[in-house]
Image (cartoon, helix red, strand yellow):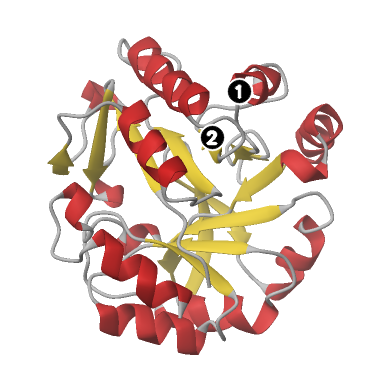
Amino acid sequence: MEFRPCIDIHNGKVKQIVGSSLKDQGSYAKENFVSSQDAAYYARMYQADGIRGGHIILLNPKESEFYEATRQQAFEALLAYPGGMQAGGGICSENAAQFLEAGASHVIVTSYVFRDGAIDDKNLEKIFREVGKEHLVLDLSCRKKDGQYYIVTDRWQKFTDEVVTEKLLDQLSLYADEFLIHAVDVEGTASGIESQLVRMLGNWGKIPITYAGGVGSFADLKLLKELGKNRLHVTVGSALDLFGGPLAYESVLQYVSE
């Protein structure tokens, strides 16, 4: 298990939000924390601590009045830590190269490859050809419905018909270097991990997977290690003291590395 940091940017500011509250209309999200520091500040911190593979997520759509401010924050963070972080949010084959040239190690893609409720094979092939497997992370963030975890798109607002299963992971792992999976129903709540999802991901474990969502205590981290068979990487957001939470950043780093 590795600690994978996050820099979530919404309306031009680094924030921690409740994932299920995110709405494009009115650029709304329920906020847990709004930082007085910019995104580059956190990128430099992660670089100084030698932590790689974190994700910078742009939480505004391109149509938003805040998109350019959010994009600028993301690019400044990438430039501050070249090659150290991944970038996602509104990325497609047409703009992926811009993020890689700015310093992203990988681009993270969801909505571009899941359209109209299903995998868009044409777009998946296009982004794969554009950046290569070694630079592509597929975001399979999901919400639970009828006992299964369905991939959600468009900043976690739209359900697809695609269920996160070992078969789907096998299929998509041919294209991706890693998966990023937010358990959206508990994202930003610090209310505990999605055990059913974590167990399935840990049982699969064929390429790196970063799990995010619900971690609020060291007991949650312990459970994640056990159910995930120490194969899953973890992101801690709202519960981290960097973002106003109770868990000390240094203590989390130490625990995860043990």
Count of residue discs: 2
Give neighbour class at mark 2: few <14, some 14-19, many 20+ (Cα, 10 Å). many
Q: Quadrant of residue 256?
A: bottom left
Give the label on residue 87, or none: 2
Q: How far across and how far down the image is residue 54, in percent? A: 49, 48
Instruction: Look at the image and tell me whether residue 78 can be seen.
Output: yes
Q: How far across and how far down the image is residue 194, in percent? A: 39, 75
Amino acid type of the residue tagged 2 in the rendering: Ala
**Viewer-side residue, 233 vs 192:** 233
193 relative to 54 in the view: left or right: left
Residue at which label 1 appears: 99
Q: How far across and how far down the image is residue 75, in percent? A: 48, 20
Q: Can you say whether 159 is above or below 65 in the image?
A: below
Circles 1 and 2, Cβ within 8 Å, touching? The answer is yes
Residue at position x 50%, y 55% from top?
Answer: 141
Q: Quadrant of the C terminus?
A: bottom left
**Viewer-side residue, 58 vs 79:** 79
**Viewer-side residue, 206 vs 251:** 251
Report helix, strand or loop for mark 2: strand
Instruction: Look at the image and tell me whether residue 64 can be seen.
Output: no
Residue at position x 81%, y 37% from top?
Answer: 128
**Viewer-side residue, 39 vs 142:** 39
Q: Can you say whether 149 is above or below 176 in the image?
A: below
Q: Earlier in the sequence, mark 1 or mark 2?
A: 2
Q: How far across and how far down the image is residue 92, in percent? A: 66, 26
Give the label on residue 15, or none: none
Q: Quadrant of residue 140?
A: bottom right
Q: CA distance from mark 1 to mark 2?
A: 7 Å
Report helix, strand or loop for mark 1: helix
